[in-house]
Amino acid sequence: MRNGHGKYEEITEEQFLPTVTKSKFIVVHFYHKDFERCKIMDMHLDKICKKHTESKFVRIDAEKCPFFVAKLQIQVLPTVICFMDGVAFDRIVGFEDLGGKDEFPTLLLTRKLVKTGCLKALTKDE
C-alpha cells in the first residue's frame, strides 16, 4: 500500500521507469484520452486494483510517452502490459482476448491478469 498499491494512478513518462521498477508486479495501461475503449479499460482496472493490492496499477497517456510506446512496440490502444521486477512479461492488446466487444465483465479481465501471473486468484473468503 505504501508504494501506491490499491489505487489506480496516472503516471508521466518521467515516472515510468521508477514506477515499474519499484514494485514486484505492475499493471500499466497505455491509453488515449479520446478512445472509448481506453475509458472502458480504465473503469475495469480501477475496480480490480482495489481488490488486488499485490500489484500496482497505473495508466499512462500514450501520446505523452512516445519513447516507451516505441520501445515496447505498442500499436493498438488500449494496451495493458504486465511487468515483473521492471521487465515486461505479458500484455493484453485491445479487446480481442476479452471477447472483442465493449461490454465484458470485470471478472474476465481479472482472470486474464491472474493467468499472466501478475495477480493472485482470490479465495472464496476474500
Image (spheres, rainbow, N blue to C red):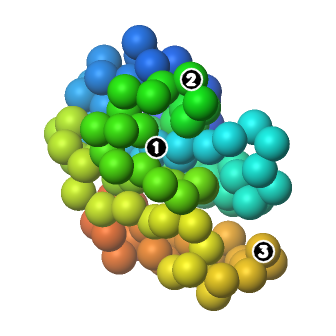
Residue annotated with mark 1: 28
Judge whether 76 appears above or below 114 on screen: above
- Measuring 68% from the left and 41% from the top, which residue is drawn there? 32
Q: Position of residue 106 (x, y in %)?
A: 67, 70
Name the kind of residue labelled 2 in the image. Answer: Lys
Q: CA distance from mark 1 to mark 3?
A: 20 Å
Quadrant occupied by the C terminus:
bottom right
Residue holding disc 2: 64
* Labels 3 and 2: the sequence-earlier one: 2
The count of marks equals 3
- The tag on residue 102 is 3
Give the left or right position of residue 54, taking residue 43 as reference.
left
Residue type, numbered disc 3? Asp
Disc 2, SS: helix
Residue at the image point whose x is 62% and y is 43% from the top: 31
Residue 120 visible: no
Q: Nearer the viewer, residue 25 or 65?
A: 65
